[in-house]
């Protein structure tokens, strides 16, 4: 079987081979301004002032038919003659990917596209920094459409290009098992490799949109943040990855599957689609109709989530091992988490009263933890008292859950990279989450997305036809403007302070032990209630304890 490195570079054309003499005539379209890539040309959307949006742009060949369950295959990007009639209408988003749960007619296999926001005056000589966002959703739902970055570009005064990508999800993106591994044209981790392929496409093509391939920052939240972490740790650390910096928000990947678990989940899929016992199981899986795939997605054990696995190459080991051993790309980092990141994962805040319930909440995430570890956890997180940050058993479980990963690796990687690194804690709640949960849950998981992406935190899925955007009140708007300036400033200059809005507190480096507390407020001298905080010794000790059992967690 080809290695992931070889699979990702199959048919890769060198940059020099793509060099193209200027066309004798410039391509135009009645749809909008045209970007000519040599092999294809796209017309953008100029609805918003001073911005152009190019949506639904394919960056690999459609992963259908014989390319189902195959690593991404590069498009034929060899320059060719094009006329105005060849210009593609790219004024809108492409279709979303098949979700989990899956519904026939909602989501497509041919969904692997990217979306680009540029200043309207950008040219191929602009050399602007580029921010690339990888959406979260457990690797099995969500879409790029919920994370529009027009404000990032508009509020940077044309100093940034933003990209949001879509990649294969769930069963179609992450099916693993021995049959997949040994098959010459298949492989695991294809959703992750799609993301990598998008970064390689950006290296080859973003200059035409006005971007600088040497100034790419990747970012993501939850499983998107987990994906970013996997790319940072790819191959055990690359000297020259296809990005120069990373933004990691509440990084979350489920525990890596054991080989036995992968086989169980693979066997369930082949049974559901009628391929059990087939002479060529992968060929059979590629031949079944999409309705059978939808049925397999919806009729799987709850333990089969289909996520990244250790493949011995791109993902050479458990991430915690790679990070603690320093086997990752040393790039500048902006990383953090929400203040109550674990709150939506540990059950009701009124029903937890015993140690056993606290343990059960953690075992829901890490079912293989032995009692020796859960007993030690109860010592590391003692019962609620005046001297603990948690005042109830539910808060105790919440702290334990979020500090095991969501609020741990962001701190750690930001302090050992040897490059400029900044940490934050997001304290401002998402009001939509609070309303939907029926009880106050604080700044829960995904809360920062409400502020960073115009009042939403999720794209279209099988459960939601369109992303829902909520208008900000004055204090939410102030924090949103401050946060977008910070995040885009880091993408532009590798420092959140460089292009911060007037009156913002200054970020200190993570190595000082400080972190930015991002919050709303009514202070008349600053635009928000954001302020620098200092990490406590007990927090550092708890995080270190979780990292010491990282191999048992299989993170």
Image (cartoon, grey):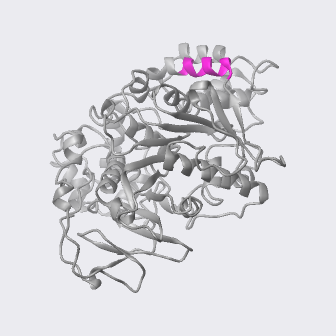
Q: Give the prevailing secondary structure in the magenta stretch.
A: helix
User: What range is drawn magenta here?
Assistant: 536-546
Could you say where residue 51 lies in the image, as x and y percent from the top left? 51, 70
Q: Residue at x 46, y 65 (%)?
A: 118
Residue 27 appears in the picture as rendered: yes
Above or below for 391 versus 150: above
Q: Does the segment drawn in magenta span residue 409?
A: no
Could you say where residue 233 lies in the image, as x and y percent from the top left? 38, 33
Q: Quadrant of the C terminus?
A: top left
Q: Residue at x 29, y 35 (%)?
A: 311
How many labels were placed on the picture? 0
Could you say where residue 121 lies in the image, as x and y percent from the top left? 46, 70
Above or below for 376 versus 290: above
Taking 463 as reference, is 88 left or right? left
Locate residue 267: give its quadrant: top left
Locate residue 62: give its quadrant: bottom left
Q: Does the segment drawn in magenta span residue 539?
A: yes
- In the foreground, 541 or 524: 524
- In the foreground, 173 or 10: 10
Above or below for 260 versus 371: below
Q: Quadrant of the N terminus?
A: top left
- In the foreground, 23 or 292: 23
């Amino acid at each position: 079987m080809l290695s992931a490195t070889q699979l990702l570079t199959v048919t890769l054309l060198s940059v020099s081979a793509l060099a193209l003499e200027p066309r004798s005539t410039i391509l135009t379209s009645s749809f909008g301004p045209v970007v000519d890539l040599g092999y294809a040309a796209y017309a953008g959307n100029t609805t918003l002032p001073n911005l152009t949006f190019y949506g639904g742009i394919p960056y690999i060949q459609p992963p259908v038919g014989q390319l189902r369950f195959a690593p991404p295959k590069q498009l034929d990007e060899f320059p060719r003659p094009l006329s105005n009639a060849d210009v593609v209408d790219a004024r809108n988003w492409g279709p979303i990917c098949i979700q989990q749960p899956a519904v026939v007619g909602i989501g497509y296999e041919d969904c692997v596209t990217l979306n680009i926001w540029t200043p309207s005056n950008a040219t191929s000589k602009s050399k602007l920094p580029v921010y690339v966002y990888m959406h979260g959703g457990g690797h099995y739902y969500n879409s790029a459409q919920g994370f529009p970055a027009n404000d990032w570009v508009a509020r940077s005064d044309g100093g940034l290009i933003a990209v949001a990508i879509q990649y294969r999800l769930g069963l179609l993106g992450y099916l693993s098992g021995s049959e997949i591994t040994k098959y010459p044209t298949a492989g695991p981790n294809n959703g992750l490799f799609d993301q990598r392929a998008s970064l390689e496409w950006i290296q080859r093509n973003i200059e035409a949109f006005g971007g600088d391939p040497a100034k790419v920052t990747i970012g993501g939240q939850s499983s998107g943040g987990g994906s970013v972490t996997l790319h940072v740790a790819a191959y055990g650390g690359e000297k020259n990855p296809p990005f120069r910096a990373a933004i990691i928000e509440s990084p979350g990947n489920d525990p890596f599957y054991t080989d036995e678990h992968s086989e169980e989940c693979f066997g369930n899929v082949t049974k559901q689609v009628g391929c059990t016992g087939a002479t060529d199981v992968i060929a059979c899986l590629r031949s079944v109709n999409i309705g059978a795939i939808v049925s397999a997605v919806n009729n799987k054990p709850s333990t089969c989530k289909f996520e990244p696995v250790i493949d011995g190459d791109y993902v050479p080991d458990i991430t915690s091992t790679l990070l603690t051993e320093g086997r990752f790309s040393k790039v500048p980092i902006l990383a953090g988490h929400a203040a109550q990141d674990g709150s939506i994962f540990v059950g009701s805040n009124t029903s937890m009263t015993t140690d056993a319930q606290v343990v059960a909440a953690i075992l829901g995430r890490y079912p293989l933890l032995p009692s020796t570890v859960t007993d030690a956890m109860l010592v590391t997180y003692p019962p609620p008292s005046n001297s603990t940050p948690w005042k109830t058993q539910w808060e105790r479980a919440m702290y334990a859950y979020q500090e095991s990963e969501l609020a741990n690796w962001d701190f750690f990687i930001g302090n050992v990279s040897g490059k400029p690194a900044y940490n934050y804690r997001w304290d401002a709640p998402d009001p939509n989450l609070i309303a939907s949960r029926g009880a106050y849950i604080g700044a829960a998981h995904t809360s920062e997305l409400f502020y960073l992406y115009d009042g939403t935190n999720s794209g279209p899925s099988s459960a939601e036809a369109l992303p829902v955007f909520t208008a900000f009140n004055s204090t939410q708007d102030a924090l949103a403007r401050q946060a977008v300036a910070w995040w885009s400033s880091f993408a532009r200059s590798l420092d959140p302070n460089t292009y911060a809005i007037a009156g913002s507190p200054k970020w200190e480096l993570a190595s000082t032990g400080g972190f930015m507390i991002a919050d709303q407020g009514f202070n008349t001298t600053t635009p928000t209630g954001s302020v620098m905080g200092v990490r406590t010794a007990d927090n550092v000790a708890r995080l270190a304890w979780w990292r010491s059992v990282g191999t048992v967690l299989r993170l």
